[in-house]
Amino acid sequence: MAKIMLGCEPVVGSLTPSKKRDYRVTNRLQEGKRPIYAVVFNFIDSRFYNVFATVGGNRVTVYQCLEGGVIAVLQSYIDDDKDESFYTVSWACDADGTPLLVAGGINGIIRVIDAGNEKIHKSFVGHGDSVNEIRTQTLRPSLVLSASKDESVRLWNVQTGICILIFAGAGGHRNEVLSVDFHPSDIYRIASCGMDNTVKIWSMKEFWTYVERSFTWEGLPSQFPTKYVQFPVLIASIHTNYVDCNRWLGDFILSKSVDNEFILWEPKMKEQSPGEGTVDILQKYPVPDCDIWFIKLSCDFHYNAAAIGNREGKIYVWELQTSPPSLIARLSHIQSKSPIRQTAMSFDGSTILSCCEDGTIWRWDTVATS
């Protein structure tokens, strides 16, 4: 278990907005009656940076943000199982560059959907319980990670349909895994967190030959020699409750629990003794009324800012590249009262979307300052 470094107190951000950016509501859509758990822009393909997807109930919907606050519906996929409730969606792409949507939820089956024709491209069966989050490796967008209630994380190849690695076992999570993320530049490294109150950092380095093999495998996906990764390189207990979101910020990690804040910390591995090491908590970003679990933050493409909703329907936008942390904006609207499960920041951060428990999608755009 990693030890928390003592000595330097973390720097806590002030909730007085710096007024760096003004946002205003430009659209509100009522998608349906069921909660919308995820919203995500397509950062995989530069042709579609203004395209986003949502999931709610058994539906995956694709939209496009147009000028003047307009949101156009492009596609909609409805799962055959009426009882499916999708919790997560991520953009990926096939070998030929076809945009794919990878969605998972209560059934534990991962659907890979061809975003062009609304048809199922592949289905991944393997998780023994619901899927809480799916993330794509931006350096190789055929690779996706899934975090599950079955206490495991799985690495999949959407091109070949292969489950390459399973992160679980002796050193794995001891409760639901709620969030997972690929390191932005170290292709071998991932982070996961969950209901056992820990964040775990894993390395795929010694298993990378299997990742490469998954692209050229000619047998049935079920015959692939899937490997178990049982031991993380670092286990961090920096939260005292469920950890429902973790994101890499360079070599640092942003993580949040149910404590009305998210934190920035630096993991320091001990190469000789895996699992041990130290954790240096650097900064804290307050988010009032953010004390329920399954609320996830989002960042713009270059990780300049993070946007996070709360249970009161408000959004807090924090600058990530400053110390002490600087609050860019606090967004609230009299009709936005429902818990915001996830936000999505556009490529440059000029548009922020939020998806809510009451089935609404809100669009905020920066106001041009004269």
Image (cartoon, rainbow, N blue to C red):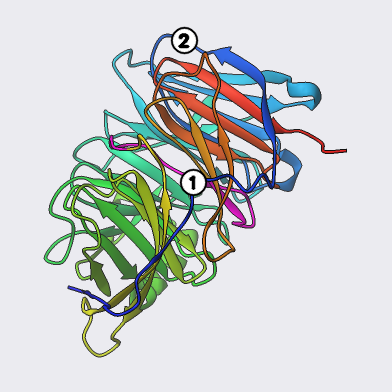
Q: Residue shown at 46%/61% (left/top)?
A: 248
Q: Which residues are magenta?
A: 291-306
Residue at which label 1 appears = 15
Give the image location of residue 306, x and y in percent. Answer: 54, 48
Q: Earlier in the sequence, mark 2 or mark 1?
A: 1
Whether 92 is drawn above or below 141: the answer is above
Main SS category, magenta section: loop
Quadrant of the frame with the C terminus: top right
Which of the 4 image quadrants contains residue 171? bottom left
Q: Magenta includes 309?
A: no
Q: CA distance from mark 2 to mark 1?
A: 33 Å
Q: Residue shown at 22%/58% (left/top)?
A: 198
Depth-wise, is mark 2 or mark 1 nearer the camera? Answer: 1
Q: Residue furthest right?
A: 370
Q: What's the residue type where badge 2 is placed?
A: Gly
Whether 88 is drawn above or below 191: the answer is above
Taking depth in this image into account, of 141 and 190 the one nearest to the observer is 190
Viewer can see residue 117: no
Identify the disc placed on residue 201.
none
Identify the disc placed on residue 32.
2
